[in-house]
Amino acid sequence: MKRQLRLVLAALLAGMLGGCATVGFYAQAVQGHLGVLARSRAIDDLLVDPATPADLKERLALVLRIRAFASRELALPDNASYLSYADVGRPAVVWNVFAAPEFSVDARQWCFLVAGCVGYRGYFDRAAADRFAERARREEGLQTWVGAVPAYSTLGWFDDPVLNTFVRWPEAELARLIFHELAHQRVYAPGDTAFNESYAVAVEIEGVRRWMKANGDPAAGEAHARSLARREAFFAMLLAHRDRLATLFRQADGDDARRKGRKALDERLRAEYTAFRIAWGVPASAGRPAQPFDGFDRWFGDGPNNAQLASVALYNEHVPAFKAMIEAVGGDMARFHARVAVLARLPRDQRARELARDAR
C-alpha cells in the first residue's frame, strides 16, 4: 500500500511541476484509477455472496481458472491481479487517443511518469478524450482516433481487477485479455510502445492457443483459430497499406502529390477490403445469398486515417519476431520472458535491430 501511495503522490507532484494541462491529466488518471479500485471486491467473496448473480459467478470462476493457468503454464506473474472484480458502470474503462500528422504514419508520443513515452493518451472519461482529440486536430493539425479500452495494466504497481467491460466476453477473448495485461507486468520497456504491445500480443496468442487446447472444446478452438486468422489477415492488410503510405509520404514531390497519392492508395485499400469481406464471409448456399464479413466495417467510415494505422502498428509491428522467439526456445515461456527482458534493457535502436533479425 505504501508503494501505491508513493506512485499516486509522485504522479500528482509530476503534474504540479508540469503545468496546468498536465495537472488536469494526471489528476483524472489518479482519480479514475482510484475510482476503479474503490469498486473492487475479492472474487472469492463474490463467489460465496448470495447476492452475486449466477451468471457472474460462472464467469468469475472461469477467470480464476484462467488466472491460475497464466502463472502455471505461461510463466506470467503470480500475484493478486485479476483476483478481484469491479463494475465501473460503463462499457469501457478508458478511452485512448491516438494521433499522427497528415503526412506520417508514426504515432505521436506523450511521455508520462513510470510508463515513459507511449503512443497514446488515456482518459477515464470519453468526453475528455474527445475534447483532447478535437484540440489536437484544431491546434496541431493532427489526425486522431479515439479507441475504447476494456482494460489496462498498472505494470504491477496495483492489483489490477477484472472489470465488467470484459468479464462476459467469449472464453477465448477473456483469456486473451488477461494474458495480455499480465504480460505487461512481466516485461516492460519504458518508451517503446510497439515493443511492449507486440510482446503482449504474442503472449496472448500463444496463451490462448494453449488454453483452448487444454480446455478440450474442439469447436470453440476451431472458432477461435478462424477468428485469429481473420484478425491477423485484416491487420496485415492495414500494415501493408501503412507501408505504402510511408513510402508515398517520403518520396512524393510536395503536399499536393502526397494528397493525390493518398487518395489513390485509400481507394486501393477499400477494394482490398471488399475482397476481404467476401473471402471471410459466409458463402451462398441452398438459396441463401452470400453474407460478407462486416466485423471490421467500423474502420472504414472516414478512415482508416494515419492515427488508426499508427495504432495498428503499435500492437502488431513486432509480433512475428516474438512468435519466432517463442518457437526458438521450444515454447518454454520462462526462457522466452527472460530473453525479452534482456531485449527490454537494450538501447531502443539496438533492440529494434535484434527484433528485425528475429523476424527473418
Image (cartoon, rainbow, N blue to C red):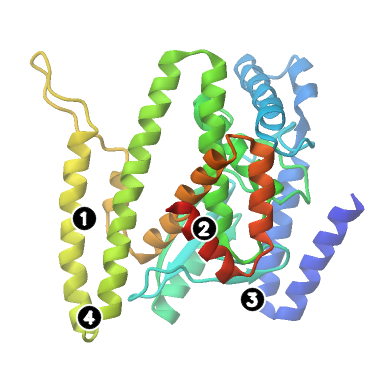
Point out the frontmost of discs 3 and 1: 1
Mark linked to residue 115:
none
- Say which residue label 3 marks: 21
Across and down, in percent, residue 210 comes to 55, 26
Q: Are marks 3 and 2 in contact (CB under 8 Å)?
A: no
- In this picture, is 149 found above or below 64? below
Point out the frontmost of discs 4 and 2: 2
Residue drawn at 57 percent across, 38 percent down = 177
Alpha-carbon span between mark 3 and mark 1: 38 Å
- Say which residue label 4 marks: 252
Q: Are marks 1 and 4 in contact (CB under 8 Å)?
A: no
- Say which residue label 2 marks: 355
Q: Amino acid at mark 2?
A: Leu
Q: Nearer the viewer, residue 198 or 93?
A: 198
Identity of the residue furthest to the left in this view: 287
- In this picture, is 16 found above or below 269? below
Q: Nearer the viewer, residue 316 or 153?
A: 316
- Say which residue label 1 marks: 269
Q: Amino acid at mark 3?
A: Ala
Point out the frontmost of discs 3 and 2: 2
User: In the visual, does 56 lie left or right of 133?
Assistant: right
Alpha-carbon span between mark 2 and mark 1: 28 Å
User: In the visual, does 200 lie left or right of 82?
Assistant: left
Q: Earlier in the sequence, mark 3 or mark 4?
A: 3
Question: Picture quarter containing residue 123?
Answer: bottom right
Residue drawn at 70 percent across, 66 percent down = 26
Residue drawn at 56 percent across, 57 percent down = 195
